[in-house]
Image (cartoon, rainbow, N blue to C red):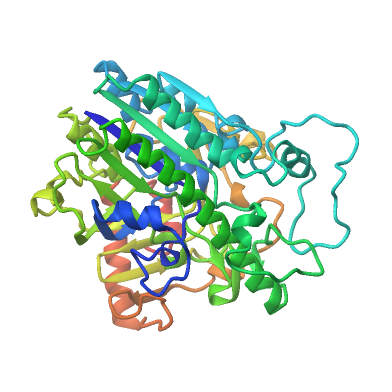
Amino acid sequence: MRTFLILIDTLKRDYLKVYNEKSDVKTPNIDKLSEDCLCFDRHFVGSTPCMPARRDILTGRYNFLERSWGPIEAYDNTFVKILSEKNIYTHLVTDHTHYFRIGGEGYINQYNTWDFQRGQEGDPWVSRIEDPDFMPDKYYGKLRRQYQLNRTKWQNDADMYPTPRTFQSAMEFVEENKDQDDYFLQVEVFDPHEPFDVPDEYLELYTDKKLDRYFETPLYNEVDVPNEALEYIKNRYKALLTMTDFYLGKFIDKLKKLNIYDDSLIILTSDHGFLLGEKGLLGKNYPHHYNELALIPLLIKDPDMKRKGERTKNLSQNVDLYNTILDYYNINSPNNNISKSLKPIFDYKNNQKRFALYGMHGSTVNVCDGKYTYLKAPNKKNKPLYEYSTSLSTIRGYLGSNNPKEVECGHFLNSTDYPVYKIPVNTPSQLVGLGDLSKFISKSHLYDIENDYNQQYDIMDYDMRLKYDEFLKNCLLEVEAPKEQLERLDLV
């Protein structure tokens, strides 16, 4: 069997017609693909942002309860390694530069082979000492010098952007292996992640307005730009999503031309969403995991075309892809009480998933039971808080660099026999350098997402708080979260 996991970064599900019929975003290829898929309506992130989300997928375990952004652990048993051991070839094509930054070690090495398309975001690719020719003086948000250098490689030529090149690499792989029928291919594109750099031909589908300031990358905080700029950046996101959809369509067409579409397993999802003005906010990471961030698309095309064009409200998360893929290959999964195979749902059976836990390390811990979402804030000191890892590398540096004498090493996790570092944390690593953003998660919330998808009405009262505190506590105990998480969340 062939499996294609298509991971589209920062994919806002309410911008897709399959989830929001009122959307004005042009994604005809995702729309068409969805007609052959089962659409999951209660599909949540697990750990956020980028690399924590990918470790969830590869290991079938929640990263965010034990550590932040970091490498593959020495004890991780990834599903791609298991596939390889069963002589199922695995290949990754990606333009995601975080695999090659500090804190991204070991991920690409899980696959038999991989191909990396360079140039996204801050990828240290184009080496030029002199400043780029195009460095605007006036701009909203952020401006990356390195990205301005990288973009000289494509200069408004759509085919030369990293996302199109990544899909082209995927098409070359399936063409070269068209006679093979037992492999796993992960096609992963960074767009529509910021910077929302998009060729004019796509931007013109949504706006002909020009701003007096350059604007491609919002700051993560409350909306700090005029309404005109906010609408403009939304249009840039829409245009970039449309471009991504166009090249996805070329890849799907290639599968059909090679007659390998119908009987393949195809999974399309994302790592997280993004706030584009909803709730008066821009970006991710610092606020509560509202639905705009936490409820993400999941479309699965069964190789037997079961349940095509249907929908399900069964709870699911990206950690569940681990056992799902192994299940489709008839491989017994390692002992794992978190990942729940989604394959039974295609036979109208329940996958027995009772809750979805999700969040970012050192921030809120959130849970959904299918009807309510409980966004649980930490105590005022956000203590005690530790990271556990066999490695000290993380995004932008190394854990414990400010307090090395406080770092311990021992057998602290029930989930592994490996000794791990135990690092006291003062500031969550993904928020280092962003200032005090604790006000955004100072209060817990409870929402009825069946009747209030946009989470506008907090229905928290004393009885409901007690009920969902107990529910969350039991969920954390079931997945063997570090015990101090209960204290940090006032659940003791």
Name the residue located 45 percent from the left edge and 72 percent from the top edge.
444
Q: Is residue 198 above or below residue 304?
A: below
Query: x%, y% of residue 217?
Result: 68, 57
Q: Nearer the viewer, residue 205 or 8?
A: 205
Q: Nearer the viewer, residue 16 or 45?
A: 16
Q: Is residue 392 above or below residue 64?
A: above
Name the residue located 73 percent from the left edge and 38 percent from the top edge.
150
Q: Please tell me in which quadrant of the rendered image residue 257 appears.
A: top left
Q: Is residue 105 left or right of residue 478?
A: right
Query: x%, y% of residue 23?
Result: 43, 71
Q: Please tell me in which quadrant of the rendered image residue 231 appears.
A: bottom right
Name the residue located 25 percent from the left edge and 66 percent from the top edge.
370
Which quarter of the figure is the C terminus placed in?
bottom left
Query: x%, y% of residue 153?
Result: 72, 36
Which quarter of the figure is the N terminus placed in?
top left
Q: Please tell me in which quadrant of the rendered image residue 466 appears.
A: bottom left
Q: Is residue 153 left or right of residue 349?
A: right
Q: Is residue 389 above or below residue 268?
A: above
Q: Is residue 225 left or right of residue 15?
A: right
Query: x%, y% of residue 93?
Result: 47, 30
The answer to whether any part of residue 60 appears in the image is yes
Q: Is residue 328 left or right of residue 29?
A: left
Q: Is residue 251 above or below residue 347?
A: above
Q: Residue furthest right?
A: 130
Q: Nearer the viewer, residue 20 or 326?
A: 20
Name the residue located 26 percent from the left edge and 43 percent from the top edge.
339
